[in-house]
Image: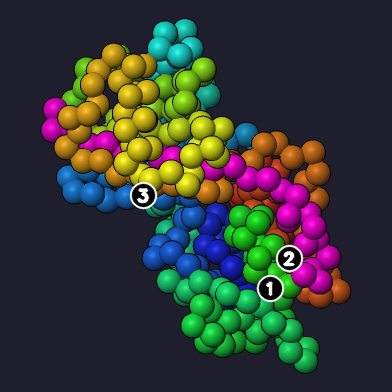
Amino acid sequence: MRIAIIGAGISSLTIAQNLKKIASVSIFEKSRGVGGRMALRHSPPYEFDHGAQFFTAKGINFNNFIEPLIKENIIKRWDARFAEFIDNKILRTISWNAEYPHYVGTPGMNSIAEYLSTGLNIKLNTKINKVVHNANNWELFDDDSNNLGKFDWVISTAPAIQSAEILPVNFKYHKDLLDRKMVGCFSLMLGFKKPIPLLWDAALIRNADISWISINSSKPDRGNSFSMLINSTNAWAENHLSDDSQSVISHLHKEITRIIGHDTGNADHVCLKAWHYANISKQTQSDLLIDYDNKLAACGDWITQGRIENAFEAGLMMAQE
């Protein structure tokens, strides 16, 4: 059996690892690296986890999965000093610890995806443009109309709306994909020659246009250069995704400065990433989208909620089915 998987995030890699012994699995990823939103940006001397910031583990399957990665130091606990803000006022502070561990990949969040990639057939820098049925097979074509091969099954792990664009309209769950509303987010990456004196390493912000600030350099096995990652709210991003990057950066600088009481306008390094499909609210309908008649499927964290454990669980369930 030949299986094509579109996308190389956690769901995709989990599916492939669980099926590679019984099928020939090929993964096609449009980016230059694996991991999807578990992303790492190198901008020497700074580095940024500019997608997923951390994760927790609740279920047995996911805890069993991460246990060997913890032993191999691919995953470590981030015992951050955490603060919760209401606008520019600190509501409470706590220290994360072993009682309810918060984890990160080391030396970057993408390290987990790289570990999962071992032994898999992955074609990077390959954007799938269309999926065409021919006789008893599916054929995949890239942006340059190159035929990438024939497959018995095609599984898209791209964001829901992108999966709807790639998979043919006779996919049984095509409307379900269109109904899954994913929302955007801006990630602002700032590097400083001198550390900003803060009493916390990670902060959740409410009642503002930014929702999250973290000192990326406070995470385990990061470099010594002071780096800060800021996420806008999904609501603000949805209204400004078409704005020019400089106006977005300017506004986020003003918000950060107002909230933390330190001017971030003197940053040594500034970079902005616009995530068009960053998150999704908790879904009431979380059935797997498997079309057995057409041998097509779609999968991702968006099946339930946009978290790393959800992405893993979705991939595991898809592989089992």
Which amino acid lies under the numbered mark 1 shown in the image of this protein?
Val
Q: Which mark is residue 40?
A: 3
- Front in this rendered view, residue 16 or 43: 43
Q: CA distance from mark 2 to mark 3?
A: 28 Å
* Residue 311 x %, y %: 61, 49
- Residue at horizontal 35 percent and vertical 38 percent from the top: 247
**Residue identifier under label 2:** 297
Residue at the outermost right position: 293
Q: Is residue 195 above or below residue 247?
A: above
**Residue identifier under label 1:** 154
Q: Earlier in the sequence, mark 1 or mark 3?
A: 3
Residue at the outermost left position: 193
Q: Earlier in the sequence, mark 2 or mark 3?
A: 3
Q: Secondary structure at mark 3?
A: loop
- Front in this rendered view, residue 29 or 312: 29
Which amino acid lies under the numbered mark 3 shown in the image of this protein?
Leu
Relative placement, left or right, of 218 versus 175 is left
- Residue at horizontal 81 percent and vertical 71 percent from the top: 170
CB-based contact (under 8 Å), mark 1 and mark 2:
yes
- Front in this rendered view, residue 196 or 185: 185
Label 3 neighbour load within 10 Å: few <14, some 14-19, many 20+: many
* Residue 51 x %, y %: 44, 44
Can the viewer see residue 266 in this picture?
A: yes
Q: Which residues are magenta?
A: 169-194
Which amino acid lies under the numbered mark 2 shown in the image of this protein?
Ala
Residue at the outermost bottom position: 135
Relative placement, left or right, of 279 versus 246 is right
* Residue 41 x %, y %: 32, 50
- Residue at horizontal 42 percent and vertical 8 percent from the top: 89
- Front in this rendered view, residue 260 or 215: 260
Q: Secondary structure at mark 1?
A: strand
